[in-house]
Amino acid sequence: MKKFKTLFVTLLAMMMVFSLAACGSKKDTKTEDNPAAAAGETDNDAKSNTGSQKYIIATDTTFAPFEFENESGEYVGIDMELLKAIAEDQGFEYDIQPLGFNAATQAVLSGQADGVIAGMSITDERKEQYDFSEPYFDSGVVMAVKQDSDIKGYEDLKDRKVAVKTGTEGYTFAESIAKEYGFEMIVFDDSSSMYQDVITGNSAACFEDYPVIGYAITQGLELTMPTDKEQGSSYGFGVKKDENAELLQMFNDGLQNLKDSGKYQEILDTYIQE
């Protein structure tokens, strides 16, 4: 009986030693195999340190020379080239969603897109819903008419129709003088339809951002600009207010780097000849 008790105590002691050794071995292995855990990081922390986010950027569809589709079906233009160069400079990825101007701005507000670049004028009204980058282009508004039109100034628009594009600086300016000069505004969702309405004679004139209509005319659009341009707002990259601050900062930093390197002016010169 005494021998049995001695054997039992010995076996119990051995089991305790093996148990402690196993516990110590498991802890050491976990620490060596997962340095992030040893440093107090969770799996999500480790992923955030190594992962890169891809942003969804909404844009217009027919707003040359800022964004338009070329013969190969690619979206090109000043905005597209700037965004591409800034993304490369700052090291982020993005997907372009060509939605049309109105739909693009709404996509950001509804959370379906992270940002919008679409020749978007920075205005006090829009600042209530969007945060804007530093301006990347200073624009202006101009009236355009058919090449054989007898319209020479705003006073010739009385009792006539004027085409405008929703949500644009041209729309805002036309609205501001419509009562004074007595014309009716016809609203379109895209520039091409607006231009065509003037060419067919349904509308007597349209109001558009100067670089946009100027580029279209050099490409063969059968319109002309009888008046000097009006001072317009500056264009900016926009995100929903109080969201995507990191993306906005990267855009600003990248834009400044492009200006410093000369790449910014190179992009402008590709599409706008002064």
Image: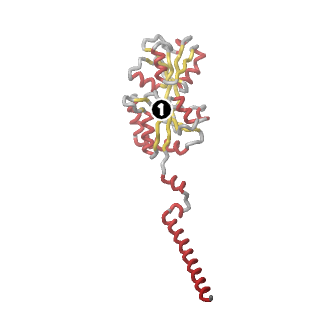
Asked if one can make out residue 260 in the rendered structure from this viewpoint, the answer is: yes
Task: Give left or right: position of 243 versus 144.
Answer: right
Of the 4 image quadrants, the one containing the C terminus is: top left
Crowd around label 1: few <14 · some 14–19 · many ≥20 (10 Å): some
Asked if one can make out residue 131 in the rendered structure from this viewpoint, the answer is: no
Which residue is rendered at x = 55% and y = 38% of the image? Answer: 239
Q: What is the quadrant of residue 73 in the picture?
A: top left
Which residue is rendered at x = 47% and y = 25% of the image? Answer: 210
- Tag 1: residue type? Pro
How many numbered circles are shown? Answer: 1
Which residue is rendered at x = 49% and y = 44% of the image? Answer: 250
Task: Give left or right: position of 128 versus 55.
Answer: right
Helix, strand or loop at mark 1:
strand
- In the rendered image, residue 256, in percent from the top left (x then y), is placed at 46, 42
Residue 56 to residue 62: above or below: below
- In the rendered image, residue 206, in percent from the top left (x then y), is placed at 50, 19
Of the 4 image quadrants, the one containing the N terminus is: bottom right
- In the rendered image, residue 180, in percent from the top left (x then y), is placed at 59, 16
Residue behind mark 1: 98
Q: Residue furthest left?
A: 72
**132 and 69: which is toward the camera:** 69
Which residue is rendered at x = 47% and y = 41% of the image? Answer: 94
